[in-house]
């Protein structure tokens, strides 16, 4: 089958086109982690589109021997389109260079298809091993039947089944007809490969889309082209949640290239279809140009009274009151603080920030005959389908959603607001429509990482041991209805768990949380919660270590103690393996030569660790701060424990290095100011991103293979970066950073 035939193929389209090229073997599975894949593998059948065929295929082997694998998770730069098929290919015993990967469309046959929380690898790893091994087992059995030999005498290797005793072999393509008639083996009879025999997993494999990316071929949502395509923009209230009163629609409709302009009433859900004005034109340029002449009268509502300055003042007031919710109350923290030999008090704060993915939000939709077809760079296609169905009243089985590659996501594309906007516009237009957000739209209508304020007190005994901890977290929340009553709940990524370190480690620990009502959209931002909580907690722990006159590494190891494995408590219920964390902490200290180097004034080391998204990560940062206060991160050493197997070494290193750079950019530069209920910043001119001269000179990555289940890596390496760098800044200058971004703190010293 040619690559041209398969380019941008959906699952059903792929099956239809495959049928034209001849029969083949298909094997698939419902990837429901509640059940064993072996019990759910469908009976393979000839590759033909018949009523009896259940099209839930992940593996296709053609009579030519060509192997095609379906990648079901959205590719947002985390490398999952490459790494998950690698697992199948490893067990299937095929040459990677002979495998073709196709992005699957949204289909319940594939199981969950969202990409977020670093869950794609851990939720599919074992199942995909089983899929590949089951196919291999059946191909070996097919050869055994053809040769009339025991299957135990045969081996699969390089896309063929071999009989070592005689040197005979049969390519997989020669076996598909026989294999298609075999029963699916029981789970107990399918033997997975032993890790020491892996040939593909753990090696460096380039991304399957890399050639297309570097040669500029269309892959992303913004690249979608269809016959008769029209182009749209959507203007929303600059103050969040505002409504349209009127707009100069007749004037806009008369402009060159404009096909239509209309008001969409929308609703109040900040993650859904908000009120606005749509402009549809013959080109993106004409739509953008017409928008510049759009004049809208807005009813901005009560959110227009909100500002960051107001939030800050209100947080200070709330900090002096008891928390609205007690998340953890072990021992008597207040009494222990009163009796402590030494207490440290500090306030930490951080702003709202944007995801700022390189590809602005976009989506293409085509509504016809009561059905809609959508092309979207999404992390959560199920949510996109659901919101279109609920908002526009289109049955789910009449919604087709094609998953395109995303130009970055970082959690932003989990929220389908841009998808429902495109669908709502398309429902009014008798043609396919591509909605494109500008960079200004992307910054001013994001689902932001929430800001926050932490008011901390820590107590030390006479030996410098941490004996008490009190954190009053003032966060941001939205009004919701719970059991018929209004309630103020923290926004997405804005909540604190009673499980958070050092909550389960101290006899006297009080964690309180108070939501501060706002109308600002909030959503998950890479390593939600952890991306800022790690900075707050491990910076303050560093303060306590220095106040105690203790080595920061030794101080952390003492807090971790010998608790072994801790069960989850509280709302989150997250278990914690203390020994794994101590292992990575000691390992990173060894690799960074912690305590063995002497630094002149203006240079220093800082250490931090954090457990996030199932990953145990520790980092040491080495920095230089000039007398004038210019920061350079010279080196970051990272030790990671994400389980027993690295799937793709190249992709894994890329994820860790990218996390370090991304975390450093957020630490150094990123902040959004809020005035009159709107975002002040508009583009990269006033929202700077990290550039190459600010990136670390060296990121030294180490993976510790441990006897634990494989987990993801897109998020857990980011949280320790900020505290490690800030702790290194203190070591270099004596300046403690308690406000983000760094540009808010004068780092100059003399």
Image: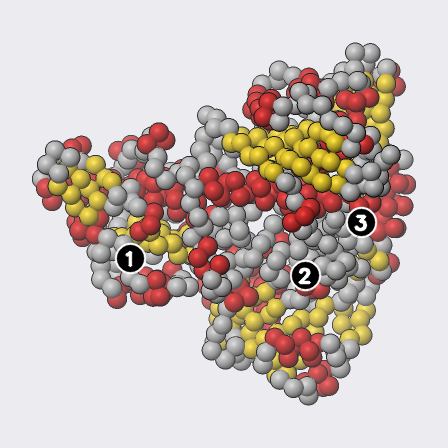
Label 3: how many Cα within 10 Å (few below 14, some 14–19, many 20+): some
Looking at the image, residue 668 sits to the left or right of residue 642; the answer is right
Q: Which residue is mark 1?
A: 53
* Rendering quarter of residue 158: top left
Q: Is residue 531 above or below residue 680?
A: above
Q: Quadrant of the N terminus?
A: bottom left
Q: Which residue is mark 2?
A: 442
Q: Nearer the N terminus, badge 2 or badge 1? A: 1
- Say what secondary structure mark 3 lies in: strand
- The picture places residue 557, in percent across and down from the top left corner, at 66, 19
Residue 582 visible in rendering: no
- Say what secondary structure mark 1 lies in: loop
Q: Residue at x 90, y 35 (%)?
A: 320
Q: Nearer the N terminus, badge 3 or badge 1? A: 1
Between tags 2 and 1, which lies in front? 2
Residue most toward the bottom?
Answer: 254
Report how far apart the C-alphas of labels 2 and 1 lie in the structure.
43 Å
Q: Which residue is mark 3?
A: 517
Report how far apart the C-alphas of labels 2 and 3 lie in the structure.
23 Å
- Say what secondary structure mark 2 lies in: helix
Between tags 2 and 3, which lies in front? 2
Label 1: how many Cα within 10 Å (few below 14, some 14–19, many 20+): some
- Residue contact between numbered discs 2 and 1, judged by CB atoms under 8 Å: no
- The picture places residue 377, in percent across and down from the top left corner, at 54, 60
- The picture places residue 55, in percent across and down from the top left corner, at 34, 56
């Amino acid at each position: 089958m040619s690559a041209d035939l398969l380019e941008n193929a959906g699952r059903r389209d792929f099956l239809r086109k495959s049928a034209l090229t001849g029969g083949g073997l298909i094997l698939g599975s419902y990837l429901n982690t509640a059940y064993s894949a072996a019990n759910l593998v469908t009976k393979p059948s000839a590759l033909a589109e018949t009523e009896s065929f259940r099209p839930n295929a992940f593996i296709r082997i053609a009579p030519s021997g060509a192997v095609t694998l379906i990648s079901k998770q959205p590719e947002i730069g985390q490398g999952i389109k490459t790494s998950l098929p690698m697992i199948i290919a490893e067990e299937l015993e095929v040459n990677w260079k002979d495998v073709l990967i196709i992005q699957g469309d949204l289909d319940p046959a594939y199981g969950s298809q969202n990409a977020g929380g670093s869950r794609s690898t851990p939720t599919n790893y074992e199942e995909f091993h089983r899929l590949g091994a089951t196919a291999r087992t059946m191909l070996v059995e097919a050869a055994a039947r053809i040769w009339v030999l025991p299957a135990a005498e045969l081996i699969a290797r390089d896309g063929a089944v071999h009989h070592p005793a005689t040197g005979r072999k049969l390519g997989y393509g020669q076996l598909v007809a026989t294999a298609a008639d075999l029963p699916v083996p029981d789970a107990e009879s399918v033997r997975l490969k032993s890790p020491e025999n892996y040939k593909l997993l753990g090696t460096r494999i380039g991304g399957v889309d890399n050639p297309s990316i570097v040669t500029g071929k269309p892959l992303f949502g913004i690249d979608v082209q269809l016959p008769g395509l029209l182009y749209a923009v959507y203007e929303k209230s600059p103050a969040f949640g505002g409504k349209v009163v009127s707009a100069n629609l007749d004037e806009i409709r008369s402009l060159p290239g404009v096909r239509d302009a209309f008001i969409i009433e929308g609703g109040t859900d900040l993650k859904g279809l908000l009120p606005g004005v749509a402009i549809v034109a013959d080109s993106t340029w004409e739509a953008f140009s017409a928008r510049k002449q759009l004049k809208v009268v807005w009813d901005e509502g009560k959110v227009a009274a909100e500002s960051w300055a107001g939030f800050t003042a209100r947080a200070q007031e709330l900090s002096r009151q008891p928390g609205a919710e007690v998340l953890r109350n072990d021992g008597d923290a207040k009494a222990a603080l009163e009796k402590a030999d030494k207490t440290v008090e500090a306030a930490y704060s951080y702003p709202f920030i944007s995801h700022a993915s390189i590809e602005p939000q976009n989506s293409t939709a085509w509504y016809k005959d009561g059905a809609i077809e959508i092309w979207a760079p999404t992390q959560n296609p199920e949510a996109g389908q659901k919101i279109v169905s609920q908002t526009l009243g289109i049955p789910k089985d009449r919604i087709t959603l094609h998953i395109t590659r995303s130009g970055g996501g970082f959690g932003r594309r989990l929220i389908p607001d841009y998808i429902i906007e495109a669908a709502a516009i398309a429902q009014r237009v008798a043609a396919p429509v591509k909605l494109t957000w500008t960079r200004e739209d992307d910054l001013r209508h994001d689902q932001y990482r929430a800001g926050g304020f932490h008011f901390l007190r820590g107590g030390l005994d006479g030996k410098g041991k941490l004996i008490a901890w009190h954190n009053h977290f003032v966060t941001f929340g939205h009004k919701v209805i719970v059991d018929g009553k209004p309630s103020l709940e923290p926004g997405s990524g804005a909540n604190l768990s009673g499980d958070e370190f050092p909550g389960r480690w101290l006899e006297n620990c009080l964690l309180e949380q108070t939501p501060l009502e706002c109308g600002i959209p909030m959503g998950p931002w890479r390593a939600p919660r952890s991306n800022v909580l790690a900075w707050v907690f491990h910076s303050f722990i560093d303060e306590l270590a220095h106040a105690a006159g203790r080595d920061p590494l030794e101080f952390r190891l003492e807090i971790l103690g010998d608790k072994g494995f801790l069960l989850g408590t509280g709302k989150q219920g997250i278990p914690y393996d203390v020994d794994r964390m101590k292992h990575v902490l000691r390992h990173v200290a060894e690799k960074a030569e912690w305590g063995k180097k002497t630094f002149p004034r203006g240079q220093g080391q800082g250490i931090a660790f954090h457990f996030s998204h199932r990953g145990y990560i520790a980092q040491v940062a080495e920095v230089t701060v000039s007398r004038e206060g210019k920061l350079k991160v010279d080196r970051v050493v990272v030790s990671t424990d994400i389980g027993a197997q690295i799937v793709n070494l190249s992709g894994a290193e890329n994820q860790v290095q990218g996390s370090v750079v991304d975390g450093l950019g957020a630490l150094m530069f990123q902040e959004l100011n809020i005035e009159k209920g709107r975002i002040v910043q508009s583009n990269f001119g006033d929202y700077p991103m990290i550039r190459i001269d600010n990136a670390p000179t060296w990121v030294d990555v180490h993976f510790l293979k441990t006897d634990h289940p494989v987990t993801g890596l897109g998020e857990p390496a980011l949280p320790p970066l900020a505290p490690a760098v800030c702790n290194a800044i203190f070591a270099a200058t004596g300046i403690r950073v308690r406000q983000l971004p760094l540009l808010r703190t004068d780092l100059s010293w003399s």
